[in-house]
Amino acid sequence: MLSPEQIQSLSLASAPKIQAMREQILACGSALVAFSGGVDSTLVLRIAADVLGSRVVALTALSPSLPQHEELEAKRLATSIGVRHELLQSHELSNPSYAQNAPSRCYFCKTELYELCEVKRTELGLGAILDGFNADDFQDHRPGHAAAREHRVISPLAQAGLGKAEIRAWSFNLGLPTWDKPQMACLASRIPYGTSVTAERLGQIGSAESGLRKLGLRSFRMRYHGEVARLEVSADEYEMFYSADFRRRVNDLLKSRGFAFVALDLEPFRSGRMNESLQGSSRRSAGVSAADESGIAGG
């Protein structure tokens, strides 16, 4: 996590970027923010609220891939920021192209999201749709950003050149509780590409991760491999597993959620690990363009 010295240094260096972001959002006149309650979209929503006031609305899409605690957190954050918050049901699971879980899965999820956003934006007469895609996201496999481009979504963090560390620093400066929130992703990201996404599997994963959080884990992923639950935990949480009692409780919990075997990954958790096996050829065969691979489409 960032130290006070790092926060101060990052804040000073990135102040012009924040100002550019404010000006870009102000020029929109009014906006709908695609809001997940994560670190990135929370900063976008806060700055949009600061410069646009009542002319900004947050929209959160609800589906089986969104953990319940994240839905509750998004509601609390929108209330604390003081913006209108729309919650709409998303139906990406009904799309076979999403459910089959190719590496381009996120494209179909984001297409569903931005179509919901466009309907609501038009209904409310708002000027633009904003998302939380940031400059560092260009470095990972982000096919969903192609859907953002197709729907003319504005990514003010990325366009201002703000990366994850700078976003956390400014979230701290603005008093946002998300400044040190662990990175989150939809529950479908726990399922290996090629293994179909179903409501039952998402429910199993969500229930398991909720239980693990109650046991004290904070920055982790529980990867789904059929009968096997594979845990990735942050380096500073490994020591929790030195305790035989803690290991027993984790094992009992995950077996109670339907897994026959529980494995602890020997590599620390880092976001995007499921994408690391992807090669250029496999991305193209899955329908991801060369532009996506180079980072033009990222997200």
Image (tube, rainbow, N blue to C red):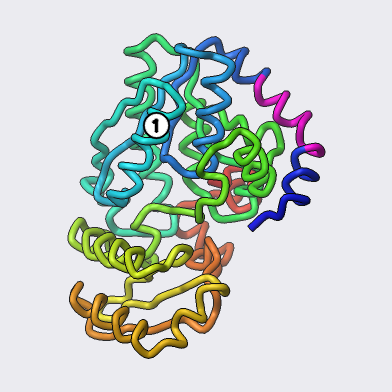
Farthest-out residue, bottom: 244
- Image x and y of residue 151, in percent: 46, 28
Image quadrant of residue 60?
top left
Callout 1 amino acid: Tyr
Q: Residue at x 43, y 32 (%)?
A: 34
Q: Residue 258, image x and y in percent?
A: 18, 75
- Counting labels gives 1
Task: Find disc 1 in the rendering and name its residue.
Answer: 114
* 242 within the magenta span: no
Q: With respect to residue 252, does 233 lie above or below?
A: above
Residue 200 lies in quadrant: bottom left
Q: Quadrant of the N terminus?
A: bottom right
Report the predominant secondary structure element of the magenta stretch.
Answer: helix
Whether 85 is drawn above or below 186: the answer is above
Asked if residue 20 is among those painted magenta in the image, a careful observer would answer yes
Segment tinted magenta in the rendering? 12-22
Name the residue located 39 percent from the left edge and 68 percent from the top edge: 216
Would you call the spot at circle 1 few (<14 residues within 10 Å), some (14-19), or many (20 or more)?
Answer: many
Q: Nearer the viewer, residue 55 or 99?
A: 55
Label 1: which secondary element: helix
Residue 238 in sight here: yes
Name which quarter of the figure residue 50 lies in: top right
As displayed, is residue 262 above or below residue 153? below
The answer to whether residue 97 shows anywhere in this view is no
Residue 215 sits above or below residue 49 on the image:
below
Residue 138 point in image, percent of width and height: 63, 48
Seen at 55% across and 66% down, the residue is 270
Q: Nearer the viewer, residue 132 or 277?
A: 132
Q: Position of residue 218 (x, y in %)?
A: 45, 63
Near-viewer residue (198 or 259): 259
